[in-house]
Amino acid sequence: MMFEHKSVLLRETIESLKIRQDGIYVDGTLGGGGHAAEVLKYLREGRLVGIDQDEDAIKAATKRLEAFGDKASIVRSNYENMNTVLDSLNIGKVDGIYLDLGVSSYQLDTPDRGFTYREKDAPLDMRMDQRASRTAADLLNTYEEDELCRILRDYGEERFARRIAKNIVQEREKKPFETAGELVEVIRKSIPMKLQAEGGHPAKRTFQALRIELNQELAVLEHSIDAMITRLKPGGRLSIITFHSLEDRIVKNRFRENERPCICPPEFPVCVCGRVSKGRVVTRKPVVPSGEELEENTRAKSAKLRVFERAG
């Protein structure tokens, strides 16, 4: 299957970066290279570094960006290792960094990757990086009930987290979980029938929670933002597209704390904590897809773009 993914908020992301022809930019979630190809069109003496942990994405992006020659450097890694990647390429500060945190259409539409709840025979995989040994099935078959409940509640915002976790533990005693269909069946049994149509497919929140836990998505985002901001040149920008409230909250809070890091009590006449602002939040409210984009790509529905600019 071809690696296809319609880039979300493409125009808005490009505009947010204020691309310089001689600038250095980093795509931390390269995917199929949609955003990267557009950035590269603006570069003359500049350079783009694309990072992704998915082997299929690396192959697709390499092919898509080959026409740009050595302007594009592609590295298989997680964006949390961005500083290490840039150091290895002898790149110091950069002019812009951007992330598109959504799961690609390719990943969702390829049953063998295990991200979908719509194919009953799909394996419970969900690894963004298939070099990792642990799969979603391993979590389901080994985590204690309380831990499963916490994941479903915190990462999936699932109101029936306790009931689902309890039923998962009971079912795995009969047979270990292997397929999406087996998990979906348990979820359906755990949620009252009259409520199953609320908010889309009843398994959506559980699958999201397992994917986030398995790939440590929120933890990676949380501890990477400060480092990415520090890596920017004065005036450089960090643009991040999120797809659910948990990600968006992290980005919003980290941006705000980098803009106003002072922890002095409000009654203090001057700052004595010594914490200096790293820049400013460009987007007081997140940028969301236009009506036209939503008509063309329903998967863009929950996308939000936030932008931070490094102090000069």
Image (cartoon, helix red, strand yellow):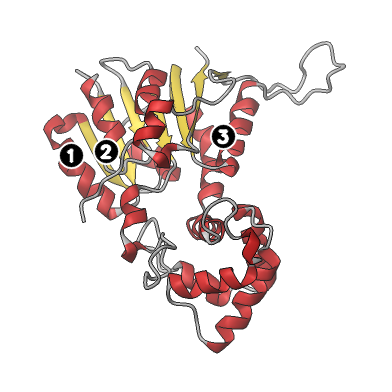
Q: What's the residue type where badge 1 is placed?
A: Arg
Asked whether residue 265 appears in the rendered view, the answer is yes
Tag 1 or tag 2, which sits nearer the N-term?
Answer: 2
The residue carrying mark 1 is: 64
The residue carrying mark 2 is: 33
Asked whether residue 93 appears in the rendered view, the answer is no
Residue 266 location in percent, x, y? 83, 19
Quarter location, residue 144: bottom right
Give the distance between the C-alpha atoms of the residues marked 3 and 1, in whole angstroms: 29 Å
Residue 153 location in percent, x, y? 66, 57
For residue 186, side relative to residue 30 (left or right): right
Q: Secondary structure at mark 1?
A: helix
Give the distance between the C-alpha atoms of the residues marked 2 and 3, in whole angstroms: 23 Å
Who is closer to the viewer here, 144 or 277? 144
Query: With respect to residue 84, does 92 lie above or below?
Result: above
Who is closer to the viewer here, 304 or 182? 182
Q: Secondary structure at mark 2?
A: loop
Do the CB atoms of the residues marked 3 and 1 lie less than 8 Å apart? no
Residue 79 location in percent, x, y? 41, 43
Quadrant of the frame with the N terminus: bottom left
Q: What's the residue type where badge 3 is placed?
A: Val
Residue lying furthest front: 194
Give the distance between the C-alpha atoms of the residues marked 2 and 1, in whole angstroms: 7 Å
The residue carrying mark 3 is: 251
Residue at 68 percent across and 62 percent down: it is 160
For residue 262, side relative to residue 14 (left or right): right
Quarter location, residue 114: bottom left
Q: What's the residue type where badge 2 is placed?
A: Gly
Q: Secondary structure at mark 3?
A: helix
Tag 3 or tag 2, which sits nearer the N-term?
Answer: 2
